[in-house]
Structures are given as C-alpha cells and as structure tokens.
Amino acid sequence: MNDTRPPILEIRGLRKTFGDVEVLRGIDLAVKAQELVFVIGPSGSGKSTLLRCCNRLEEASAGSIRVDGADVMARSTDVNAMRRHIGMVFQSFNLYPHMTALRNVTLALVKVLGKSRAEAERIGLAALDRVGLAGKARSYPGELSGGQQQRVAIARALALEPKIMLFDEPTSALDPELVGSVLNVMRELKRGGMTMLVVSHEMRFARDAADRVIFMDHGVIVEEGPPQLIFSAPGEARTRAFIAELTR
Amino acid sequence: MEAIVQQFFNVAIMAQALPLVVAGLRQTIVICLIVIPLGLAGGLAVALISLSRLRAVRWAAIAAIDFFRSIPPLVLLIFIYAGLPFAGIRPSPLAAVAIAFLLNTSSYYGEIYRAGIESVGLGQWDAARSTGLRAAQTLAYVVLPQAVRNVLPDLVSNTVEVVKLTSIASVVALPELLYSADMARSVTFNSSPIVLAAAIYLAMLWPVVRLISRLERRIAT
Amino acid sequence: MTAWSSFVDTFFNWHVIERYSPAIAKGVVVTIEVAAAVVITGIVLGLALAVVRAFRVLVVNALIVVFVDMFRALPPLVLMLLVYFGLPNIGINLPSFAVLWLVLALVLTAFAEEIFWAGILSIPKGQWEAARSTGLSFVGTLAYIVLPQAIRLTVPPLTNRTIAITKNTSLGTVIGVGEILNQATTAQSFSGNATPLMMGAIAYVVLFIPVVVLGRVLESRFAWRRV
C-alpha cells in the first residue's frame, strides 16, 4: 500500500439531520486513490445518506467533503460540473426507459461535457464495452435483464471518467444469478485502478476486492479495517453482532 | 317520420347552407390552431411553476389552476368580452376567445402535465442529476418525455374538449362553425344546418374519441 | 376618479350588488337544481349502461358504443340548439330547463359509461374466476365482487368529468334558462355596469372551488392511472 497517495475523497465531521432525526453524526472518512472502500451496516445506519451527501443529492447539515481537494459543499462550487467527477450507481439502476442503452450513456457526455454526437458515441461504446455490453448499445432498458441494466448504469457513470465511483447497494435489487455479472464488472474496475466507495452486503466480494471495510451503525463509523480483520475478528461487539447476522 | 327528416335531414337546405358552414369550419380551425398550442405551452409553463421549490409560488400556481377550473369557460368569455369594455378595454371577439381559452385550457393542461411529471419516479431525477445534468436539462431530456408519455390520453382527451369548446365562441358572435350553422337555421327555420355542423364535428372528433377509449383501456388494464 | 375607485365602481359597485343579489341568488338556485338533476341521472344511467355492456350482447353493445361515442364527440351547445330549436318543429315542446337537463344528462351518461366500463375491465379476470368458481352467479359476481372494486377506482375521473359537465349549465343562458350567467348578463344590461358579471363569476367560483378541491383530494387518494 502506497501511503503517500492523496485522498480522492475526504470527509470530515459530516452530519445530516432529516427533520428531528440525526442520520449522520459526525463521519470522518478518507478514500485514497485506487482504494476500494466497502461500507456495511444495518439499514438506517446512514450508509446511503453518506453516499448521497458526497454528490450533494442530499445537502449535509454540517461538516466538509472534498473530492480531489475541491470543496464539494462550497456555495461557489458548480454542482453540475463537480458531479461529473463523482460517478454514482443506484440500487434501482434508474436507467432512462425511453432511451437506448447507448443514449443513456451519451446523454451527459453531449449535454454536460459538450461533446459532439460522434465523439460521445465513441466514448459511450467504449464504456459499454468495458462492462461487456457493446452488443446491447441499441437496446432499450426494458429489453435488458436486471444485471445488464445495472451494468449499463455503471457504463453511464464510467463514461464521464469520474475520479471516484459511489455504489449504493448495486446488487440488492438483482436476482441472485445476475449478481455475479455486476460484481465481475466491479472487480474489473478495481483492477483498472478506479477509486470506489461501495455500500453493499456482498461479503465475499468485500473479502476478495476491498482494501478497507467500514462498519457503520446509527450514523457513526463504529470500526474500520482490512476485510480479513473486520470479517473474522472484529474488535467491537456491535460489529461482531452484525457480521454474525449477515453470515447466518 | 317524414317530419323528422324534413326538419333535421333536409338535404336541399344542407346544400344551401354548405358554403356558410364551411366558412365557419375554417374559422373554427383557425381558433383551434391558435388556442391549442397556446394552451399546451401555457399549461407547461403553469405546471413548471407549480413545481417551484418555493411553497408560496407553488400554492399560487395551484390556486390559479383551481380558480380557472372553477369558472365555466362561457362565463370567463362573457366577462372578458362584455365586462372589460366597462373598464375601457374592448377586445375583439377573437381576442376575447383567445384570452378566455388561454386561461381556461392552460389550467386544464397544466394540471395534466403536473400529474405526469409527478408520476415520473424520483430515481430518474437522481440518476440524471448525478451525471451532472442541470435541472432544466433533466426536465427536458429525461423527465418530460416520460411525463408526456404517461399522460398522453389525458392530453389528447383535453384537446378534444378544447375543439368542442370552440362552439361557445358562437355566443360572442364569432362566425365559427356553430354560429354559421345557427345563422343558417334562423334564416331557413330549419335545423338541418345544425345537423350538418354536428356531422362535421363528428367527422373530426369521432375517430379521436375512439382512440382515446382504446388508450385509456390499455392503461387501466 | 382614481384608477382604483373607478375599477371598484365598474366591477364591485355596492349599489348594483345590493340591487341584483336576489336575482343572482335565484340563478344560483337554478344552477344547483340543474346540476343536481344532471349529476344524478347521468351517473345512474352511465352505470346502468356499463352494467348492460357487461352482459356482452353484441348488438346492444354496438348501440351503446355508438351512443357513447356520439355524445362524447359533439359539443353540448350544438346538441342544445338542435333540441331547443328543432324539436318544436316536429311537435315536441320542451321547456328550456328540460332541454338543458336532458342534453347535459346524456353527455354525462356517455362519459360516465366509459369511465365505469374501464373500471369494470380493469378488475383482473382472476376475481371473476374466483367468484364464479365458488358458485356465485354472473350477476352476483358483478354486484358483490366486481362493481364494488370498480366503482372505487372510478371516483377521481368521474369527479373531474362531472365537474366539467355541470359547469356547462352556464350554456343554459343561450336558450333562456335562468341560471347564474343569464341573471348576470340581464342585470348587466339593465344596470349598465359590469358588477353583475363579477358577481356571477364569483358565484360560480364559490360554488365550484370546493368541488374542484375535493376532486384534487380524491385524485391523490385514489390515483388509478399510475404507470
């Protein structure tokens, strides 16, 4: 591990309140370049909210978030330009049903980055190829399986060449047989050097691919460490209880 | 029986009235060409305003929609045509019709667009915004296309209503289809011209009405 | 006179309001009477036609479809003029109140039938099959299983459509029914002031806004056309 790499994502003292419920209670987290950080925890622990604060789909109540040094939450930051650097993959894919897979991928390239249609299609096809779906470029989401749709969603984020990719339970909505195809793509991304922050309960994947695992509960980070440590011999009682539940 | 045919299906009188009625039809089409695009555009504007982040603006838009949906279009038309002159504004019959219809149809179309936009899941917004698309771009390329598709039967159905609504322009003596037919009726003391006008409305709208039924049924089942 | 006081004098003249309130009030009563008559007959007849359609007798259904399509495609004003001016010439003399009620009721019947029919069709076949397989008759299934579910679905579109059609009572002014608009325009020409028109407009708003708001509430509670 090269410890002199600068953190791509740096979160300090992040807090988020919804109404009178404090969902995030002071999160400090740094994700270094090319790291795959895995976040686990019970539902309601704030994992999704954490991710959504990073690209400001939710506005944090307090704290700071920096991506590659740039302050995400500053008022002067151009949110739309900033979002291109932070790729997001959702549990429910959220592909645009009225557009082909290729158009799903190229829309932001054309409208946000101002690329020409031809250039965008070249980049888009390359991204679809990376996820193994170049052949489905002209298909509509309705014609694709869940796993294929999620991979197109990954290509859509990938095509913008983000500095970090956030995965919010990417396989939770998939039938078990389709999960593998998506995880393989994620493994490929990791091998290609992408920085990734993943919320998921795919433990086997974490054991293979994660550099660090973080356990969150009730809006705070309870424990973090390398996967072997967290999964086999966690220090905290809460972590132990959660892992036990997961592996039952 | 003989009397019914004489009074309502008198072909000779229909032939006589035809030129007048056709001129009226042309005027009706002109009205539609003005009013329908205006209403569609106005309705979209109203719907977008009603989605504003500011609660006061949202409520104002919804209040305006409900207000103009509560007033019968004829009342609005008469108010504009006969009432405004007292305040010094004298709109022509066509202008009065255009204004009244704009206010009325924008509210109805606006309500339909609103329901359509709300029916597009939040996930679509999230996905589009997270790739850096602006709110306006998200609306234009991702949300509105889906919204319109969802409420297409309602949009078509409302457009049929607008075409039927043009008949009230006859009350302010705008020489559209019904006015012309009624003029022919009062001159000939025979109702066949109106039957002719009815036949023309049917020819224009019956196919669309059938289509709407089919669309509605496909969504419901 | 300042612009404001001139505006008030033109549209909110107190003397005129006092003088013509009784007339407008009479118009309100007439409007409500016609509307109530139209709503009751229209919905009952519409439901009846939809039920008849469920028996799937081909000729009868064809007739129903023709009737419904015609009354959905024709402007109510056209129908009213046809009935009001045409019928007397073949010996049928109906008072204008009856003409207004008849035309609007038939229009509502047509729309209501389509709405109820779509509701009946949307009940999954499984419901029919389950009910019939327990020995329930066709009519019994319709009465106890299908219609109760279907009717619940029809509330929002039916409410909206009913509101739209009852507002057409204002068309009665063209054939001399003494409803709100008629009273208002008469008062306006007698008084030479636009205030009666404003009173008429406000009377309609007061009458219908509660119903429109109710329709909006029902729509969100019973949303049945969600893709």
Image: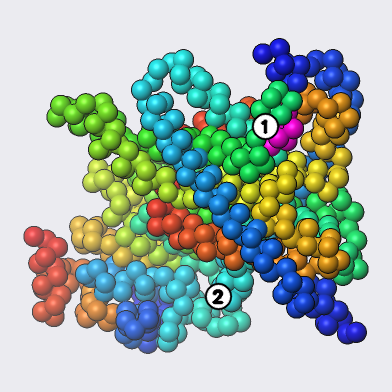
The residue that disc 1 covers is C93
- Residue C161, above or below B29: below
| Amino acid of disc 1 | Asn
* Residue C13 vs residue B123, the one in the foreground: C13
User: Dot 1 lies on which element?
Assistant: loop
Q: How many marks?
A: 2
- Name the chain letter of the residue that bears numbered label 1: C
Dot 2: few (<14), some (14–19), or many (≥20) neighbours within 10 Å?
few
> Does residue A223 show up?
yes
Q: Amino acid at mark 2?
A: Arg
In the drawing, what numbered circle is on residue C168?
none
**Disc 2: which residue:** B55
Against C34, is B55 above or below? below
Q: Chain of mark 2?
A: B
The answer to whether residue C80 is magenta is yes
Distance between the Cα atoms at labels 1 and 2? 55 Å
Q: Position of residue B4 (x, y in %)?
A: 70, 18
Query: In the displayed image of the protein, which residue is found farthest to the top?
Result: B2
Question: Is residue B54 visible to the viewer in this orientation of the structure?
Answer: no
Q: Magenta segment range?
A: C79-86
Left or right of residue C194: residue B137: left
**Main secondary structure found in the magenta portion:** helix
Image quadrant of residue C1?
bottom right
Q: Is residue B191 above or below residue C108?
A: above
Residue A207 forms part of the magenta stretch: no
Report the residue at 10% width, 72% height from top.
A241
Vertical placement of C74 versus B84: above or below?
above
Q: Position of residue A68 (x, y in %)?
A: 49, 76
Q: Nearer the viewer, mark 1 or mark 2?
A: 1
Residue B90: horizontal and vertical position, in percent?
Answer: 90, 61
